[in-house]
Amino acid sequence: MTDPDLSGPQPQDVQAGFCAVLVDEWVRAGVTDAVVAPGSRSTPLVVALATDPRMCTHVVLDERSAGFVALGIGLATGRAAVVATTSGTAAVELHPAVVEASHGGIPLIAVTADRPGELHSVGAPQTIDQVGLFGTSARWAVSPGVPELAASESWRSLAARTVSAATSSPGGPGPVHLNLAFREPLLGSAHGVGLPPGRPEGAPWHQPHGSSGGVPSAGVVDLLAAHAPGRGLIVAGAGCGDPAMLVAAAERLGWPLLADPRSGCRVPAHPVVAAADALLRAPAVAAWRPEVVLRVGASWTSKVLTQWLAGLGPDVAQVLVDPWGRWTDPDRRVGHVVAADPTAFVAAVLATVGSDGLARRSEWAEQWADAERTAQKALSHELGPSTGLAMSEPAVARALVAGLPDGALLVTSSSMPVRDVEWYSAPRQNVAVLANRGVNGIDGVVSTAAGVALGSGGPTVALVGDLAFLYDANALVGIGSRDVALTVMVVDNDGGGIFSFLPQAAELPPDQFERYWGTPHGVDVGAVAAAYGVEVWRLGDRGALDELLANVAEPGVRVGVVASERAANVAAHQYLNAAVAAALLGS
């Protein structure tokens, strides 16, 4: 029997070299951030990330939180962030963020460490089947096995392809799952391994080319152009393309632009309509009928708007434009689905129309603009700082959007916060509104906001309910040591406030409704935040709220708590909708 040859690279050194190549190639492909949840089996990758000064590495103890922090970085920047975990249930904890990234179109590289094949199916600890762990949610999933030097020529391609698949897959940006098996010993050195060289001048191994969506269909372009400056309507949501161009196009076409705050189009401009939800609750406005509707970007949360669009009838041409050809039409009323870049599509419409006859504003556009002015005036009057609704949930949302400094980012939780911002915030410039609306969950929102703050470097505010805060309180672990300006605004109505708007609240016995839907928890959310070492502001009036808003650009993490009451919140919404309807009748 002969002694093993120890003159060449040892297996642990090959693993270290493999991970060094991955990190180098990720950097070449534009990845700037990695989120690491501590563990043992992921050691080779973590060492490579930690020792590469070009990569900004963030440590998050909770894997579920880590996934959403990485997602938040992608949401804010459009760049894929790496999130790395050890094996077993640690890997499973990434699933919620992976699902949100998939449905929300957010680039994410989920890297799960794994045990080598010989430790599977023999009762080895922390070992589960991680191949295909995230199912159809992953844009691409690969388990290359324990790194071997014989396969080193494939390493750069593997890393570059993960970035490409996460940012420009045929189905749009989304998550990639890279499952990496490592064998003990886990600590090695990449020096002397003979790593495969990269491309010259720091170029990535693969550079995908091509555009999202094809050339706009001339027939659909002509269909829209034929209605300028007639009774056309644009409905814009997140991902609608260049907001400034869309606003300018609406002005030229003489069409109202119903602008979701996440679209970037909700700015002070003549065609922009922000109060669409309240307006369409008024029978007189709901009776208005466009001839054609152009839908770009994600859907609004407003059921009133979506039901109105669904009820327009087959004679109203509805055109949905999405860069990846996704069918965001749950009511199945859209007649034309166009896979094209929204900005390029709108430019084609304008080029077809030309400039003749587009300088004047149509009566149709003026009708919507007058209604918008009336609604905003009514909302400002009813939600002012000295009114009885000054600290209501709609008022807090409206004041928050209005009071943020230029360049701030607002992350809204699902359920009531995103709706209140959508329904009641007034148009303004220079504030980006983001949300996890891929699957509309309320988990991971605080972590997402932390990722947005880390990725953007700008002042970030999260508007969340008490349940969303409690579900993700672990996001506050160690957050004070990070270089962020993050404010978490918690509207605390002691339970699931959105359920009070549903038929269950009126049709079920009160005790049954409270137990299964209202779900009061009785937890002092301010005390929870304080237990994590975070500064807590208890906001009892608009003066205190304004003072907190004046501090959101300051470094550090703070939590503001606004007390609310669920039944009173329902009444406030009903009152505001009635006030807008009354104002429209009186105008």
Image (spheres, rainbow, N blue to C red):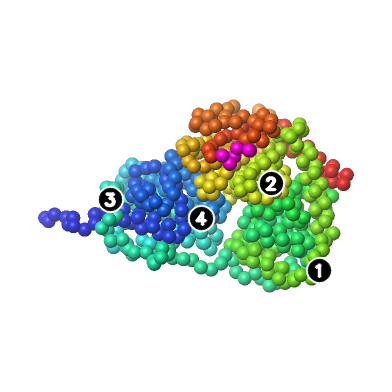
Residue at screen point 32% across, 63% down: 196
Local crowd size for mark 2, using a 10 Å CA cut-off: few (<14), some (14–19), many (≥20): many
Relative to 370, 422 lies left or right: left
Please give left or right for residue 129 compared with residue 172 in the image: left
Q: How crowded is mark 1: few (under 14 residues within 10 Å), some or many (20 or more)?
A: few
Inter-mark Cα distance, 3 to 1? 71 Å
Which of the two discs, 3 and 1, labels the residue nearer the N terminus? 3
Which one is in front in this view, the residue at disc 4 or the one at disc 2? 4
Disc on the earlier residue, 2 or 1: 1
| Three-letter amino acid code at the position of disc 2 | Glu
Q: What element carries label 4?
A: loop
Frontmost of labels 3 and 1 is: 1
Splitting the image into 4 quarters, where does residue 390 fall? top right
Q: Which of marks 4 and 1 is nearer the N terminus?
A: 4
Q: What stretch is highlighted in magenta?
A: 549-554
Q: Residue at x 83, y 55 (%)?
A: 367
- Please state which of residues 294 and 347 is positioned toward the viewer in this rendering: 347
Against 13, residue 531 (above or below) is above
Residue bearing mark 1: 357
Residue 274 seen from this side: yes
Q: Residues within 10 Å of mark 3 (few under 14, many from 20)?
A: some
Task: Where is residue 197? Give x, y as percent.
Answer: 34, 64
- Mark 1: which amino acid? Gly
Q: Distance between the residues labelled 2 and 3?
A: 52 Å
Q: What label sits on residue 79 in the rendered view?
A: 4
Q: Which amino acid does label 3 sit on?
A: Gly
Could you tell me which residue is drawn at 41 percent across and 65 percent down? Answer: 201
Q: What element carries label 2?
A: helix
Q: Does the magenta stretch include residue 72?
A: no
Tell me the tag on residue 188.
Answer: 3
